[in-house]
Amino acid sequence: MSAKLNRIFSRLRIAANLAFNAKPETLAEASRLLKMESIPTFRERHDALFDYLSAKANRSGFELYNKNLMWQDEPDFWEIWKDSPYFQRQRPDRKFVLWSMACNTRNIPGDTAECGVLDGASSYLICSARDGAGPSEHHVFDSFEGLSPPQSEDQPSSDLAFHWAAGDLSVPLEETMGKLSRFDNIRYYKGWIPNRFPEVAERSFAFVHVDVDLYQPTKDALAFFYPRLVPGGILLCDDYGYHTCPGARRAFDEFAATTPERQVVHLPTGQGFITKRAGNAAQG
Ligand SMILES: C[S@@+](CC[C@H](N)C(=O)[O-])C[C@H]1O[C@@H](n2cnc3c(N)ncnc32)[C@H](O)[C@@H]1O
């Protein structure tokens, strides 16, 4: 009975809105909504709602994600992500790409590393993806005092774009360690990049995530880690395709041009990566 009353009230609400705001597009939206209420199955309602919201978003120049993409239901990822302290605090699409790439390196011997860790969301996924893949260490480098001072390369071309400042994105080391405490193979290197890189100079790496938003530390990280990447290993930069991080893109493009791979793979999530080719052996 109460469901029926709810439906009646909902229709009355839409009708009242129409009376006050009877633009043609509102009429069309209202008729779609009214139709939706008579749709019996969840799946059909879900699809109808998607079509409705999609049309609404398109009118304002936005686009909704395709609802038929399998990653949105990938159980292995969602079990980890939902169980993490970061669930619903960050967009999952980039995190899924990162996780999937880290999984791709499970059979490749070598350590993993992250430059720019914040409170550890990406390191959480890297360690989860490679859990049980054999003995390896995960090395994390961060000032834990936020960004270093941005340089001219980091200035977005538009004044409207967000501009970084020194000290942005600062999270205390203890907070990150707390959130990553379930992993016992993480080594922490607090300090300004590249000062502590020499401590891992003898290691080789299967997967490296660079996420420092700025030109100089991105450049330093690539120069250090690429020679230590094993063949088949992946170097992923989180900030590559962001208008807010022009320095990161410049650093990666400049560096990639000096490697046999030459070109960065640019993803619609804003990430960019290169996979080191076989035969292009790691140098110490
Ligand atoms: C965007 S956040 C990293 C986000 C993290 N990868 C994640 O997935 O949640 C950028 C991080 O880079 C660090 N950072 C920026 N410039 C740095 C530098 N020159 N040396 C060390 N750390 C730096 C900041 O402290 C911050 O934690």
Image (spheres, grey):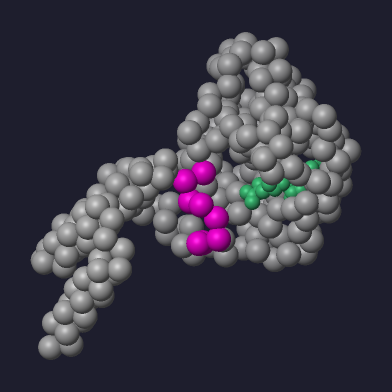
- Is 197 placed left or right of 59 in the picture? right
Q: Provide the residue span drawn in magenta.
A: 87-94
- Does the magenta stretch mainly form a helix, a strand or a loop? loop
> Residue placed at 14% from the left, 61% from the top?
35
Residue farthest to the right, as pictured:
195
Instruction: State which quarter of the image contains the N terminus.
Output: bottom left
In this rendering, the count of numbered labels is 0
> Residue placed at 19% from the left, 73% from the top?
11
> Residue placed at 71% from the left, 18% from the top?
254
Instruction: State which quarter of the image contains the C terminus.
Output: top right
- Is 243 placed left or right of 152 in the picture? left
Quadrant of the image occupied by residue 228: top right
For residue 18: magenta?
A: no
Residue farthest to the bottom, as pictured:
1
* x then y, percent, for residue 192: 86, 43
* x then y, percent, for residue 39: 12, 63
* x then y, percent, for residue 99: 51, 44
Instruction: Tell me if residue 107 can be seen.
Output: no
Quadrant of the image occupied by residue 7: bottom left
Instruction: Tell me if residue 176 can be seen.
Output: yes
The answer to whether residue 111 is above or below residue 7 is above
> Which is more toward the observer, 230 or 87?
87
> Residue placed at 82% from the left, 29% from the top?
152
- Is 134 placed left or right of 33 in the picture? right
The answer to whether residue 30 is above or below residue 110 is below
> Which is more toward the observer, 188 or 157?
157
- Is 154 placed left or right of 60 in the picture? right
> Which is more toward the observer, 222 or 108?
222
